[in-house]
Image (cartoon, helix red, strand yellow):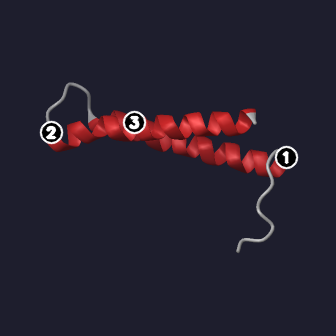
Amino acid sequence: MLLKGILVCLLIFIIYNLFRALPILVKGKSDVPMSRYLGRRVLFSVVVFVILLIALATGAIEPNPRPY
């Protein structure tokens, strides 16, 4: 359950960074470059993916055996 909570928090942080980059994209003027927020989003997306792969490999989570 802790693993799922961590993943949900990371996904919320990814969405937060995406919305932080939105005003910079729309206005075009900011002290902070848009690439900072988009780079964080990509970095944490990779972290989530790696955590999922490790959890699947160790058996902490199980994939759905019937995909339909």
The answer to whether residue 32 is above or below residue 55 is above
Q: CA distance from mark 3 to mark 2?
A: 16 Å
Q: Determine whether, in the image, residue 29 is placed left or right of residue 14.
A: left
Q: Quadrant of the N terminus?
A: top right
Sequence-wise, the earlier of marks 3 and 1 is 3
The residue singled out by tag 2 in the image is 28
- Find the distance from the CA under tag 3 to the CA under tag 1: 30 Å
Earlier residue among tags 1 and 2: 2
User: Mark 3 highlights which residue?
Assistant: 17
In this view, 56 is above or below 43: below
Provide the secondary structure element on which disc 2 rests: loop
- The answer for how far apart the CA atoms under marks 1 and 2 are is 45 Å
Q: Secondary structure at mark 3?
A: helix
Q: Residue at x 21, y 43 (%)?
A: 25
Q: What type is the residue that disc 1 sits on?
A: Thr
Q: Residue furthest front?
A: 68
Residue at image location 59% in from the left, 39% down from the top: 8
Hey, which quadrant is residue 29 in on the image?
top left
Q: Mark 2: few, some, or many residues within 10 Å (few <14, many ≥20)?
A: few
**Residue pointed to by mark 1:** 58
Q: Nearer the viewer, mark 3 or mark 2?
A: 3
User: Given contact means CB atoms under 8 Å apart, are the residues at marks 3 and 1 in contact?
Assistant: no
**The quadrant where residue 9 appears:** top right
Residue 67 appears in the picture as rendered: yes
Which amino acid is tagged 2? Answer: Gly
